[in-house]
Amino acid sequence: MTDEEATEFSGRIREALRMVIDPELGYNIVDLGLVYDVAVEDGGVVRIAMTTTTRGCPATDYLKSGSRDAAWSVPAVEFVDVALTYDPPWTPDMMTPDAKQHLGIG
Amino acid sequence: MTGVALSRWTMSYFVAALISLIVAECLMVAGFGYPAAPIEAPETLVLVHIVTIGWLSLLMCGALFQFVPVLIARPLYNNTLPLPTLGCLLAGLFALLLSFLQIAGIVPSHPACFVAAAALLAAGFGLTLFNLGRTLWAARPLPLPARFVVVALLSLGATVVLGIIFTLVLGGIATVPHLLNVTALGLPIHVIAGLGGWLTFSAIGVSYRLLAMFMLAPELEGPTTRAAFYCGTGALGVAILGGFAAVCASGNVIMIVSAGGILGLAGIACYGRDVLHLYRARKRRVIELNSRMAGVALGNLVATLVVSIGLLIAGVFGKHVGVVVFLIAFGWLTNLGLAKLYKIVAFLTWLECYGPVLGKTPTPRVQDLVVENRANKWFVLFTVAVWCAAASLMLGAPLPFRLSAGVMLLATVGIIKQLLRTRRLANVQPTLRLPKGVRPPHLLYCWVQPT
């Protein structure tokens, strides 16, 4: 897979991940900055590194499985691995400007 | 599930707690117990224990089964035990109320009731302590908010032990002179361990985390938070252990408890400062109703302390102690409890219904499950009614107290109606309400679906 193909494939997966919202903030996890990395490998293998707004959040497992299902909905995806990390811990500064504006975050 | 799971029976605790609150408010409207009866009358004990065990303790137990795992990012030790625990607590409360009604001569006397009350409540609270204790023990070293809960659980243990002694002595089952002495002098310790240690310390510990979580504020573990913890723990230690020692040595219990109160004031001042910092440092400028009303509850706590100090200076604290207890139970703990319930019910309902389909289909936000404009007026009305009721108690005016209690009841029903709408997904847009794979939630428990 060329770099251009990988970037395009990764972009489609990020777009699919926008289906997943953080229930408390009510905005998609990509623009909230909760998705740290989407790595694609040959054979349709996708590895997602993500976090949650707070450690111990009761929605953690649903966010992980939701991300897996959303990524799996992208054509040509054969395997999805979702890893949860708190390094670095999430902060509101990681949101996109649109997400900050939507949530009225100063 | 590998992470923190949805607590299946927390909703059952909330339903039982809200029914108890309604019953207590109905009794106040009917003029049952204080102020129509003396503060130490069995009728007042019925009312007090419906509020403290039926409403506040069941609410707190249900919330802790869900949120202790959040505080320590580990699952609950046992997710099945909360159901038999609830059964023991409800049966124990029922037996305790029957015991008080026997003392009042309202129902025929039967000593087995006292024994059953003591045994069932000991079992219920014992199971709570075991389950939460094992959960916390596995997560050492604990973050600061969880340490507040540990102290709260120790205080619960002290409250229950004293309560059992009182019950067995009042029922004529325990006749050892030392236990009679504990019953005669230990009531202030029982009240402080229950309202101050168990309920207030739990609320403080959980609120540190929830306020930061819901307002996107920085989590606090700094010097003022540590000071709040150590001052509060010291205050409870002095009041409970020192008070118990004073009872055993026939010392001055009130003086010891007052010494603890000074430390407690310092602890609450630090907590108040922390909460102000959380509100000021929050990233979410527009805060939700539950956070606004939690602020009101904290204001009520501060106002209650000011009233208490005023009464102490005027030398009439003993005469108006009922007003102070009423304000702590309703102005602080009930206001906070209802505010957080409004959020937690929506959050748990969202997890139960929409968590399993996340990523498969568009889902509403947690905030789409509530309509704050509808609920706001009931919270404001409840707060105003609590202060009117407290003023009526202070002025010795029973009829205005009953009228205020009626308004509290009306506001509570209004809030419960909003909770029911949340639980029934009635506020969610029809197009998003029940996508494929989502089953409507049950009112009494959470259906935990696999992820």
Image: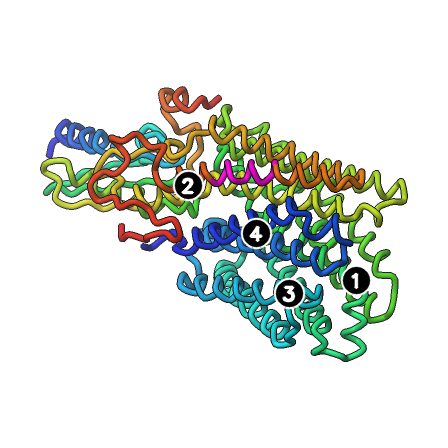
SS for callout 4: helix
Would residue B408 be counted in the magenta stretch? yes
Is the residue marked by circle 2 packed among few (<14), some (14-19), or many (20+) residues within 10 Å? some
Badge 3 is on which residue?
B160
| Left or right of A69 in this view: B348 | right
Please name the amino acid that badge 4 sits on: Trp
The residue pinned by badge 4 equals B55
- Say which residue label 2 marks: B420
Mark 3 crowd level (few <14, some 14–19, many ≥20, 10 Å Cα): many
Separation of residues labelled 3 and 4 (CA atoms):
16 Å
Q: How is the image coloured?
A: rainbow
Q: Nearer the viewer, mark 3 or mark 1?
A: 3
Main SS class of the magenta portion in the image? helix
User: Which region shows up in magenta?
Assistant: B407-416
Of the numbered discs 2 and 3, the one sitting upstream in the chain is 3
Three-letter residue code for mark 1: Gly
Q: Chain of mark 3?
A: B
Q: Is residue B48 shown left or right of residue A2?
A: right
Mark 4 surroundings: few (<14), some (14-19) or many (≥20) residues within 10 A: many
Query: Which comes sooner in the sequence, label 3 or label 4?
Result: 4
Q: Nearer the viewer, mark 4 or mark 1?
A: 4
The residue sitting at 53% across, 66% down in the picture is B91
Question: Could you say whether the residue bearing mark 3 is in a helix, strand or loop?
Answer: helix
Tag 1 residue = B243
Tell me which residue sits at (82%, 41%) in the image. B309
Where residue B425 appears, as percent x and y from the top left, is 34, 38
Q: Quadrant of residue B326?
A: top right
Q: Please, which chain is the residue tagged with disc 1 on?
A: B
Residue type for callout 3: Val
In depth, the one of B395 and B436 nearer the eye is: B395
Give the distance between the C-alpha atoms of the residues marked 3 and 1, in whole angstroms: 16 Å
- At which x and y percent is residue A69? 21, 42
